[in-house]
Structures are given as structure tokens and as C-alpha cells.
Amino acid sequence: MNITELTVHELQNKLAKNELTITDITKAYVERINEKEKDVEAFVTTLTDEALNKAQDIESKVNSGEIKGEFAGIPIGIKDNICTKGIKTTCSSKMLENFVSPYDATVIEKLKSNNLINLGKLNMDEFAMGGSTETSYFKKTKNPWNLKKVPGGSSGGSAAAVAADMVPWALGSDTGGSIRQPSAFCGVVGLKPTYGLVSRYGLVAFASSLDQIGPITKDVTDSAMLLNLITGHDEKDTTSVDIPKKDYVKALTGNIKGLKIGVPKEFFGEGINGEVKAKLNETIEKYKGLGAEVEEFSLDIAKYALAAYYIIACAEASSNLGRFDGIRYTYRTQEFKNLKEIYKKSRSEGFGAEVKRRIILGTYVLSSGYYDAYYKKAQQVRTLVSNEFTKTFENYDVIITPTSPTVAFDIGSKSDNPLEMYLSDICTVSVNIAGLPGISIPCGVDKEGMPIGMQLIGNKFQEETILNAAFAMEREIKFRESYKPKFK
């Protein structure tokens, strides 16, 4: 038995039967990290020694009856833009290279209250800006399915760590597809919850009206379990929604008879790789076989979502990143003559090229004379996109699309072409624009053996519907049983 290949619910089952101990599990993951991190480079900060000590402490308390809970002693990895008290939170940027957070994000508090063990902070695109984890200041994470390919981004470290069995599950953040796209590239499950369902308190802000924390896991059951742990109203986050708590695991029946699935033809047209399209069409036929009602429809407003997204996201990034000025807790230039030079040189030296590009674009669209032409118009388009989805969900329970137009691409192949990189978000950004939930699950591989992801989009706060639809297809495809990364 290879412990690190097990899902979390399988680990829980082994713990309940006394076939494994908490220390056994943590030790297996620490050994796996020590063995594979040099190849994958998924971590910014590893906490292996701390994890082993924590495992022994939790195990003794569980044995003595001092603490209980089905998640006690389960390890996890955390994306490095989620604040962790006493541990570096760098956002993979030189600007925050030495920043140690004085507090925990709300999601971290929830994990700690359930006695999970943090294995480390995971690599990402700098300040979550990118789709390949190549903009990280520290390292370029590799895709475990092919070490010459990108893992996707910005949560590439989280997806790669799960795919490489270095963590059983992980938290990521999704602003325009940053959980779903790397999950698709790495052959794992990624869920972007409805905006407001999970507290953003303690998530370093990129675009505040779009960002959302969510799970990256080995299967759909684990995704539902981790979502159960991190949801809930938070008074510290004014965008957190106060709704009754649900048990998403109970929704996983696998029965989708009569489920109405919409297929937007705009997401299957020009620019979508032929093998991706073919695999999605196979999956759609499988849904029909399971009793779902599938129908093609037009979602033409979605084609404007990408342009609106990059205007809104860059504008909010320009505003949010204004706090990193070289004065307080960030990187400060060594040579300066006056205050203006501190600001200018600290930001010039501390931020990478992609972050600077988005700050400049965001500042431009917010400037007087251009605000109405760009930012205001983008917000109007956002309303139209949101309204179009609202109308669509009057007719359908779920929308199915590819997660990404292509499979994972070669490291360095799009670095010099930002526009091409931005276009790879075409299938995911409309979900964030409208504040909807979306899940990506692997539905097969291409002829080179690289994973292909399919995306299911649901109506607001209807996570249970997309989770169950994903669960039904996961059982049908049996991806984890059929395919393994070459890396393993």
C-alpha cells in the first residue's frame, strides 16, 4: 500500500480501522516531499519537521481522548497567498520574500480547529497573476505528468503537489480560473466556490471582487469534504454570505437522472484544441447515458467576459497592490535619496514583470478620462454576463465546458506572449465575473498522455449540484484508476 496515493476519505477509513496511524501518514508525506520536491518544485516553504512534531502531538491527544474529529492529523498544503501565523506568506514575490504573517486567515483557523497538519506553503504565480506558475520569484513548478510542461496557474504549486502525491489535498485561490485550470493541467479536481461562500479574510488580495479560496483534491468526495470544512459566514469579511450550512458530501448520490445540462456552443468553437473538444463530446454522451438531459444553447455574451475580466482584475490589482510601498512590511530598496525614490525603486525591484504589467494597465483604466471608457464599461458588461447566466439557469441545472482550450503547454512556450497566456483563461473567467461556482475534473488524456479537464458551472450557492454531477462522471470515467502521471 502506497499511503500517499490514497484519497483523504481512504486515509480516514484506514485510521478508523487502526490500519494506519497519524504519524504513519505524516511521515509518508514528509518522505515523499523529501524525495520528489527537487523535481517538481511545488513548495516555497516546507514544514516537514513541524508536521512530524504536530502529528505526534495530535496522535497522543487522540489516543488519550483529549481531542476527537474525523480530520485530526490529516495533512494539507496551503497556497502561499493565504496568511499563516508565524509562517512566511510570500505570494511568491520578492516584495514579500521575508513577510511572516502575524495572524491566520479564517480558512486556516477552521483547518486548525479540526486539527489538520500543514505540510507547507505552495508555489504560485506572483501575487496570483499568471496561468503557468512561471511568474513566481522563487522557482518554476513542474507538471508531474511531464516535467517539461507547466502545471498551470496561479495555483500551480497546489495542483502539482496533489498530483505528485506530496500532499493529500490543498487550498488554492481562484480569481479567473486559478484553481480550475491548474487542476485540469495536473489531472486533479479543483473547485471554485460561489463568491462569498468561503471567507477571503487573510487571503492576500489580487482582485477583491473576483478572488475566492477553494479546494484542490484527488477526487470529488475529498473536494466536498474540504468545502464542508472551509465554508461559513465570517464577520471579518464583509463579502461573506450568511446562509445555512450544507453538508456537500451528502449530496454525492451519483444519481443525475433528469439533470438538465446546457452545452454553450461558443465554448466549443474556434481556439479549442481538437482532442479537448473530442474528449468533452465523449463525456457529454456519457452524461446522456446516465439519464441527464443535454441540450446545446448559445451563451454569446460570454465572449466579452475575458476583456471585461482583465480590465476589472487589473484595476483592482492596481488598487490592492498600492499598499506594497517599501515603507511598512515589504521589500525596501537599499539605495535611495528621498521618499519618492523609496517608492519607485522598491516597487520596481520588488515586483516582477507580469505584476508591473497589470498594475500599469489597471492604473491606466482607472485614470481620469479613461475610467468611463474602460472600467465603467467593463462593470456594465459584467452585469450583462451575470444576467445572462441567471437566465440560462432558468433552463439548465448545470453548464458543461472545457476547463482550458488546451492541455498543459511547454515551460517557456508562452512566456514572451502575455496575450496568448491571457487567452488560455477564456473558459474560466466568466464564472468569476458572475460569482458562480465551477468545478474541474479530469475526463481523459490526449495522445501524449496529458490530462484533459472538463468544467461544470452551477448557479449561485448550488455547489451540491455540480459536485454530484462531477461525482457521477468521475465514477463513470474512473480517471484515477485508469491513468497515472509518468512521474510516478
Image: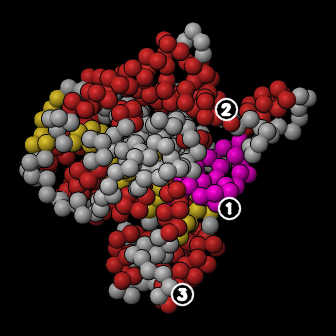
Marks 1/3: CA distance? 24 Å
Q: Earlier in the sequence, mark 2 or mark 3?
A: 3
Callout 1: few (<14), some (14-19), or many (20+) C-alpha neighbours within 10 Å?
few
Q: State the separation of the CA atoms marked 1 and 2.
A: 24 Å
Viewport quadrant of the N terminus = bottom left
Q: Which portion, as a residue range, is magenta?
A: 77-105
Pick whichever, 115 or 282, lies toward us: 115
Task: Point out which mark residue 427 bears.
Answer: none
Residue picked out by circle 3: 60
Of 178 and 196, the residue lying toward us:
196
User: Label 2 sits on what residue type?
Assistant: Gly
Which residue occupies the foreground of this view, 270 or 85? 85
Sort mark 2 into few (<14), some (14-19) or many (20+) by Cα contacts within 10 Å: few
Q: Which mark is residue 322?
A: 2
Q: Amino acid at mark 1?
A: Gly
**Circle on res. 86:** 1
Left or right side of 280 for 311? right
Quadrant in which the C terminus appears: bottom left
Q: Nearer the viewer, residue 307 or 162?
A: 307
Image x and y of residue 391, in percent: 21, 30
Give the overall secondary structure of the magenta segment: loop
| Residues tagged 1 and 2 counted as in contact (Cβ below 8 A) | no
Task: Indicate left or right for 54 with 255 as reference.
Answer: right
Q: Position of residue 122 (x, y in %)?
A: 56, 55
| Residue type for callout 3 | Ser
Q: Earlier in the sequence, mark 1 or mark 2?
A: 1
> Is disc 3 surrounded by few (<14), some (14 to 19) or many (20+) residues within 10 Å?
some
